[in-house]
Amino acid sequence: MRKIKILIFFLLSFYVSLSILSNNIYELKKETKRLNLLSKVYNKNFTYTDIYGIPVICYHHIVSDNWESKEKNIFHLTKNQFQMQINWLKENGYATITLNEFNKYLNKESVKLPEKPILITFDDGRKNFFTNAKPVLDSAQYKAVLFIYPNPININHDSFLTWQQIQTLYNEGHDIQSHTYTHPLLDRMSLSSQSKEFQLSKKTIEQKLNSNVQWLAYPFGAYNADTKNELKKADYEGAFTVFSGSNFPGEDKYSLKRILITSNLSISNLKNKIMTSNLSFLSIEPEEGSNIYDKKVIRVKLEKNLEFNNLRVEAGSDFVYNNLPAFFNYNKNTGDLTVLLSRPKKSRVVLTVFYKNIDGLVSQNTILYSSFKPPFIS
Ligand SMILES: [Zn+2]
């Protein structure tokens, strides 16, 4: 009886590993086919980043596998879930790069990158990074970028990393960047308050680590038109949203895309999110980030001759989940996309346009508007 059990177990594991392997091979074949086809059509050698850009992943909490708490939410991943995602990335040839390399790529400067570059980022600077995420990253030889906000660290809050731990991470090659000073909703703040958040955070981290802070992750993913100007003035090189998609040269460096990881995301969904391309917005009216409290129509210029049936537009106020389908019109001859916003609007509008190419490749892009009614918090 025992022998039979062992045999069944053996056959089952063999079957499982074989199906995982064949699935991976199938995906790799599809990927290679796409690259070859494009290279033939355009008579140029297409690389992985030409199509998929550089994806950036955004994590929050990695908790131990048996952790239960009232505070548990969709941003708590178990160590096992995290390990599986990192394994998938490693097995599929992804390699983490530095922000400096990422910046050179965005600026179209010459830089030698791995074939499948990726950035792995962590928001908030929670202590569980040190205990649960770091060992997994270490064994994969991956480096992370941590976006921290000094306020709780300075008062030695229990669930946040200490400055000493942050120093250790920095010495080991992980990057430490800014998530503002107090983690506010920036799109509701006055210009001067936003500016203070950026300057104080940058100064504090730089002094503590003797480092260079030039990147920010927007708390809650929220910002408005003023935010970007204030960041530039405060000497920030770029900023990360929580809008899905990938990053390509020539796009706005203050609205960088990130794949927000929630605990219900499967490996195949993660793969689809990583293997996404960018839908270029040639012009946007009104300007991204602006206040559209009294506006109903958004005009976006896309490429001409897209297939109407393969376009999809979603609008709403949610950063994390997909929003509702929106009414839109697309003129093939001019490339003009007109989106009608339904009322009532909450304090912001997130508008995402998806396009599915003939071979199944999805391109997408997102615009954020504020519809918050002043006065702003000072
Ligand atoms: Zn945060």
Image (tube, helix red, strand yellow):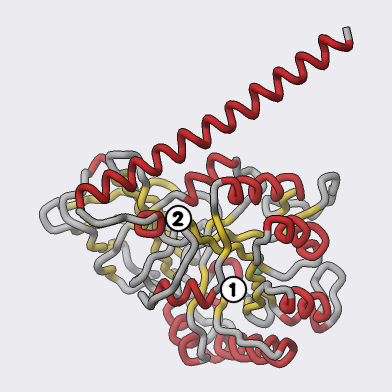
Circle on res. 124: none
Separation (CA) of disc 2 from disc 1: 17 Å
Residue 285 at x, y percent in the picture? 27, 69
Q: Which residue in the structure is indicated by mark 2?
A: 316
User: What's the residue type where badge 2 is placed?
Assistant: Gly
> Is residue 246 at all visible to an observer of this figure?
yes
Residue 211 lies in quadrant: bottom right
Q: Is residue 108 above or below residue 367?
A: below
Q: Quadrant of ligand 1?
A: bottom right
User: What's the residue type where badge 1 is placed?
Assistant: Leu
Residue 378 at x, y percent in the picture? 59, 87
Name the residue located 71 percent from the left edge and 24 percent from the top edge: 13
Please give left or right for residue 375 compared with residue 129 in the image. left
Residue 106 at x, y percent in the picture? 40, 73
Q: Is residue 196 above or below residue 36?
A: below
Name the residue located 50 percent from the left edge and 85 percent from the top edge: 231
Q: Which residue in the structure is indicated by mark 1?
A: 185
Q: Label 1: state its secondary structure.
A: loop
Residue 47 lies in quadrant: bottom left
Name the residue located 65 percent from the left edge and 47 percent from the top edge: 87
Q: Nearer the viewer, residue 25 or 197?
A: 25
Q: Is residue 179 above or below residue 272?
A: below
